[in-house]
Amino acid sequence: MNCKLADIDLSKNTALTYVSLNNNQLTSLDVTASEALGTLFCMGNQLTELKADNVTKSVNCSKNNFTLATLPALPCKTYTYAPQNAMQIAAEVKAGETVDLSAQNHITGLAESPQTTTYTWMTEEGTALVAGTDYTEEEGVFTFLVKQDVPVYCEMTTAAFPKFSGSNTFKTTTTLVEGGSSIEGTRHNAPVITATRGNVLITGLANGCDVKVYNLSGQAIAVQTSTGNAVNFSLEPGLYIVKANHISCKVNAQ
C-alpha cells in the first residue's frame, strides 16, 4: 500500500490468498496466476485494466479510471467498484459540436443482457440541462445547442452496474460549452433554413450532406441526405431542431 508502484508482476506468486495494493499508481493489474486468491484490494490507483476473474470472495477496485465500458464484470461474492474517478472529456466544446459517450451505452456488465445507459447533463451548480433546449442526443452522442455560463458534466446510470448511484454516480469531468455555431448564420457555410406550417426547407447544402431533424426532447425524427443543394421536410407544425453541416439550430415551423 502507498508505495507509488507503477507496475507489479504477480505471475509467479501462485499461492497468494490476500492482496492489498491500494493507493499506488498502477494502470493495469493481472492476478489470475494466484489461483487461491480470495481477497483483492486495489482501490485508489489509475487502473484501466483488471484481470481478476479468479478472485472468489472480495474485490475492491473503486476510485480508479474505469469507465462503464472498461469496468470488468467480476464473479466474486462482494464486488466494490463505485465510485470511479471522473471520465475525462474535452475541457471545452462549442455550441454545435459533439461529445461522444456512445461507448458507455448498451453495456452488459453484471446484468444478463446489454443495458441502456441513462445520461443526465448537469451544471456545476446542480441544475439539469434540458434535452432539446440545451442539447440533442443520438445514441449517446450529444450535440450542444447553446452556450452554458458554467461548466457542465454528464452523470450516467445503468442496470449493468447498479452501484453507480447517488453520491457514487458515474460521471465525466466538466466541460465548458462556449458560443459557437448553434445560431443560424454564425458560419459562412451555414445552411439557410425556411420553415412554415410544418414545412422545413434547408438550402445551401453540399451534395451528400446528412440533415437531421430532432424534436424538443432531443429525439431524431427525420433524416435525409441531400442529392443537390437542398432538402425539404414535411412535418407536423411545431418547434424542431435541425442539424446540418455540423451546425444545429432551433426552427419554428408553426
Image: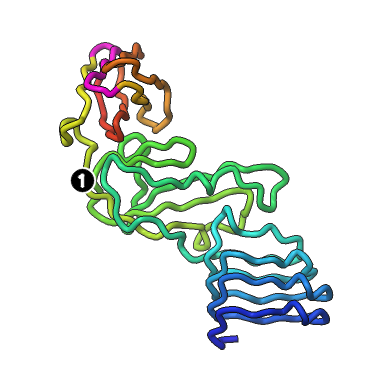
For image coordinates 57% across by 54% down, the residue present is 68
Image position, residue 110 (x, y; %): 69, 53
Question: Is residue 18 visible in this depiction of the protein?
Answer: yes
Where 219 falls versus 1 (above or below)?
above
How far from the left and from the top, in percent, is residue 173? 40, 60
Which of these two is toward me, 170 or 71? 71
Q: Is residue 133 left or right of residue 35?
A: left
Way the structure is coloured: rainbow
Residue 42: x and y in percent read 62, 75
What is the quadrant of residue 55 in the picture? Answer: bottom right
For disc 1, the marked residue is 179
Which residue does the image show at 30% across and 29% down from the upper left? Answer: 244
From this view, report whether residue 177 is shown above or below residue 239: below
The residue range painted magenta reads 196-206
Assess whether residue 157 is covered by the magenta stretch: no
Element carrying mark 1: loop
Front residue (pair 167, 31): 31
x then y, percent, for residue 228: 30, 15
